[in-house]
Image (spheres, grey):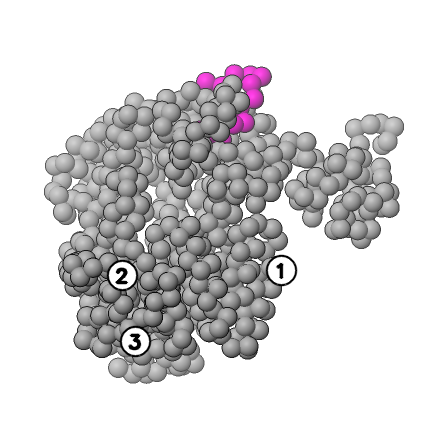
Amino acid sequence: MNISSLDLSETSIQFLHNQGFKTLYPPQADCIKTGLLENNNLIVSTPTASGKTLVAIISALQHIENEGKIIYLSPLRALASEKYNDFKKLESLSKPNGSSIKVSISTGDFESNSEYLKNSDIIILTNEKFDSLQRHGIKWLSQVSLIVIDEIHLIGDSYRGPTLEMIIAKMLISEHSPQILGLSATINNVEEISDWIGAKPVVSNWRPVALSEGVFCFGQIDFKDGNPPIDIENSGEGTAIDIAIDMVKQNGQSIIFTETRKRASSLAKKIEKMMPLLLTQEQLKELSELSQLLDKKDDKNTDMKKLLVELIKHGVAFHHAGVGNVPRQIIESGFRDRKIKIICATPTLAAGVNLPARRVVLSSYLRYDMQYGGMSPISVLDYKQMCGRAGRPQYDDKGETILIANNESEKDSLFDNYINGDVEDIESALLIEKEIAGKKHLTHLYTHVLATISSSPFGISKPDLLKLFNNTLYTLHNGNDDLESKVEDSLEFLLDENFIEKRNNKFLSTRFGKQTSLLYIHPLTACDFRDAIMSSQKGTNYTMGILQVIASSTDFGRLFSFRKSDESPYYSFIHKYQSQFFDIGHSDSEHRFTFRILAALNAWINEKKENDILNLVDIDPGDLYFATENTKWLLNAFYKLTALFQTRHLLDPILLLQLRIEKGIKSELKEIISLDRVGRVLGRALFDSGFKTRESLYLSSIDDISKTPHPLITPSFAKKIKEQLKDFESDDPNIR
């Protein structure tokens, strides 16, 4: 099907032509035939790289022509940024009224109502941000005519799924019904999901690049599709390495998916030794420049950065959640530009950015399962997600995904279970229970029952509440009897904890409940915060106590296992800060899971270097960034609830702690750190040279300040400091 035959304006057609689109892929044509441009809801289940983004763009163009507003939902911030760049190109077009199309993105700041978004035509949001906007009762949401839901199969995800499920359930009972376009590479029960949403399914196995799936065993790769086996040379360094290196010899790229972060870096180090002989002088020169770029752009002098700088010189890198933003972007860009030949990654890459390679290797099909407490096989869905990284449309005529077996029996099992096996059905995770302090809680249901009540300004009756929840995927699969009893349990919990009250047969949120919902924190987190706040005493230092309550909260996420080597430091830590801790009913085992995060945060606010923190508790720079960002968000919520309960003696200490977390400083730097261009390192240098206050800097000359023993504190820098202080007013009347 030709692009020119689409029912779009000439301007839109020309735009698509200018972007290089002349004809549609078969799955894209199927979407048109199924009523994409006739306002039909669609669930599109087609392989990675089959052109689902173009389907969304075509639909968006039509809605813009009809003066509509579009929301694109993404499960991950990295994916949202990718889609923002894709849709940003539409800003070169004009709307029917002559004004330019405006594209915006918002992926955080859940407390804000983001009113500025109402002036945008295409808005890229995470699922959580959209949920937050619904809670705020944003009126312009009624103007939305198209909602695109990327990675819609994540409805079944135990973490993100319930939020997406409730977003859709609210759409289904809304007076205003936008067109829904759900996108996924892997949905087995697509008919079921389509029936639930009132959508037509578009299912295809077509890929622009053919996929060959195979299993390595006893020196060769055997493929499902009958392609001739490939013999792999044994280097003695490991099977996954040999399979990846074999592709480099063919001038291709590989991704190795590993079980753990340590395994990813370990494999990368082994590969690096083998790469120089496989690369040309021109390639090595390009990689040297890329390595220098990382060294220059990333100002963090950590062992991880030093290692990545060396690895990239020889065309290899590792990629996981602990890698910082700057190196991650450089690694991804270097791989897309075909400079980096092999990436060793944890499975987070499979669900993240679009980063295809000719060959994908699974070093193991086992992963650590925290619930199980040991290694367990990955799901077929996870395997298929990793398969989606195989094959680059612009470079390859096929992609390859390789599993590794130790014997013929295991080889047969891998073919049966993964290569020929069916993806698991998507099921609701709405009623998943979590055990906290020895008691089971309906964590997701508490959240969404409260959110529904708090966003109903005049309250909501039980029948109306059940009407919403009876439109969920859970009810479709399980009926409504069990759900109704669980909703009642949730109402009882929310009433007992004073999140809601009942008046005239309607449920209304209290101030506490409303604030909890708008702050976008879990009711169990709010309970912990409230109990800590109300038990606090004047004159006590609660710095570590507040951080412990935050790190152990339901919302914090990404905690680290407690190791044997942590036993002694843990008890020393507890003994040292015991007087600062709150007693909010958490068990010792729960506190153990927070220990490494707490130790890292404590080291950070005491000005330890990132490399020292890595060595101290084995927390990578990316994890430290995640921890500080999460802590800042939850500290803000803690402050707002403290103000709500009028516990004034905690307010200033919380504000100080917010500053220390943001800047990574001891309390004594709080004054001079407020100056522009003065961070934790320069602030410490100035302080240790006697400049302990803004007043001391005000009274000093440029020459005196520039004598501070730090290469960046030059006369020019000192002059800028003095310029900032020209309107300084001292508390000392003699100085005034």
Label 1 amino acid? Lys
Q: Secondary structure at mark 2?
A: strand
In the depicted view, which residue is nearer to us: 352 or 292?
292
Relative image position of residue 87 (x, y in whole percent)? 42, 67
- From the viewer's side, name the closer residue of 587 and 140: 587
Residue that numbered label 2 is attached to: 404
Circle 1 residue? 296
- Which region is colored magenta? 534-552
Residue at the image point whose x is 27% and y is 74% from the top = 230
Q: Position of residue 159 (x, y in %)?
A: 31, 44
Q: Give left or right: position of 328 versus 418.
A: right
Q: Amino acid at mark 2?
A: Ile
Check residue 398 in the rendering and tell me which mark sits there, or answer none.
Answer: 3
Do the residues bearing badges 3 and 2 touch, measured as CB atoms within 8 Å?
A: no
Q: Quadrant of residue 84?
A: bottom left
Q: Left or right: 418 with respect to 274? A: left
